[in-house]
Amino acid sequence: MVRAVGRWVLPCLALFIIGPLLSGLIGDLRAVDGGPDVTLLVGTTPLLGLVLGVICVAVALLYGAIAGKMLGERTGTLSAGLMLAWVAWGTGDLTKVWRFSGSSSTLLTVAVEAALLGAVCLAGVMFIHKMALDTKPAATKSSTKKDLMQPPIFVGILAGAAAAIALAWIVGFSGARGQALMAAVAGAIGAGVVTPMVIAAMGADRPVWFAPFLALLVAGIVAPLIGFIAPGAEHLEKAFINATMPGALVVQPLDWAAGMLLGVPIGMAWTAASIGKVEESASRPAASTTS
């Protein structure tokens, strides 16, 4: 009974109390035009933005680890993701960042920011997984570089990243905060579905449980780099004015970070259920033949 209530209480605390408080930490970050539309590293105070961003992410992941230890991994990632969603909400419209600060260096800066946040969140997910109440001891075994370079794992990660970018592109037709955040979550769900499906289809010798999370990290890094091709670094402002900004360029790095915690576990759960049903149906003819 206590755990059942806790699975509602802890995420609600993250969503309605702690998340808004964390979002307030970055509320004073300002763009070059004095507006609130910034990223952590693109604005008038990038160093302050980075420090505050790391604090917010660390607090969210620590809360998630505590929730996971008490009530299970899914509660931990959900709680941390809801808090980061609030922080992402406070950063502003990324299309306006491209309008006022659009350049090759800005595209690279946003990609670096996505890499930093994604790496920290991936480490946090691994920590939550290790600490979670419902994690089996065998599941905490660390993967090696050799495991990651297995062809099925490598291809699965690339396929998951491509699916995440494609879904974010479709959903993210506006830089509005809710729209961009949902684009990231949709992309994360796609990575959570496609990555394990490809890995299972190709048959990896040593599965890597965090491969879908790594796929979303790759997607977050690649997404802003698409701006070099579409619409081109020199045409970012024009794309904003004409409302033709590619969907991959409306998603903030913090959106990807929140999506990693909110969406990837959903996609992985869907895939696990689907694969489980396929394996169960495949075993039935064999069982009937044996009998």
Image: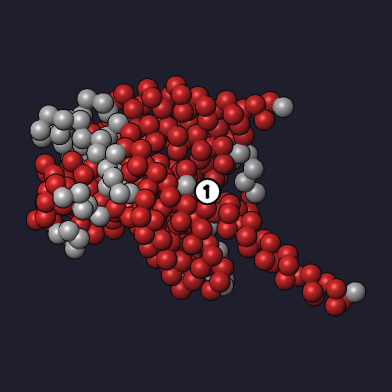
Residue 269 point in image, percent of width and height: 58, 52
Given the current orientation, which residue lies at the most extreme right position? Answer: 291
Colour mode of the rendering: secondary structure
Tell me residue 253's x, y (percent).
30, 45
Q: Residue at x 54, y 65 (%)?
A: 197
**Residue 36: x %, y % from top left:** 20, 30
Q: Which quadrant is home to the N terminus?
A: top right
| Residue lying farthest to the front in this orientation | 242
Query: In the rendered view, does 198 fall on the left or right side of 177?
Result: right
- Considering only vertical position in the picture, is 27 above or below 210? above
Residue 147 sits above or below residue 136 on the image: below
Q: Quadrant of residue 52?
A: top left
Can residue 11 be seen in the rendering of this structure? yes
Secondary structure of residue under mark 1: helix
Sort mark 1 into few (<14), some (14-19) or many (20+) by Cα contacts within 10 Å: many
* Count of numbered circles on the image: 1
- Picture residue at 68% right of the left edge, 25% below the top: 2
Residue 5 at x, y percent in the picture: 65, 26
Quadrant including the C terminus = bottom right
> Between residues 116 and 91, which one lies in front from this camera angle?
91
Give the residue drawn at x 67%, y 61%.
276
Residue depicted at x 27% and y 34%? 91
- Figure quadrant of residue 167: bottom left
Identity of the amino acid at label 1? Pro
Q: In this rendering, would 41 be left or right of 269?
A: left
Residue that carries the numbered disc 1 in the rendered image: 265
Quadrant of residue 275 within the rendered picture: bottom right
Residue 121 visible, this angle = no
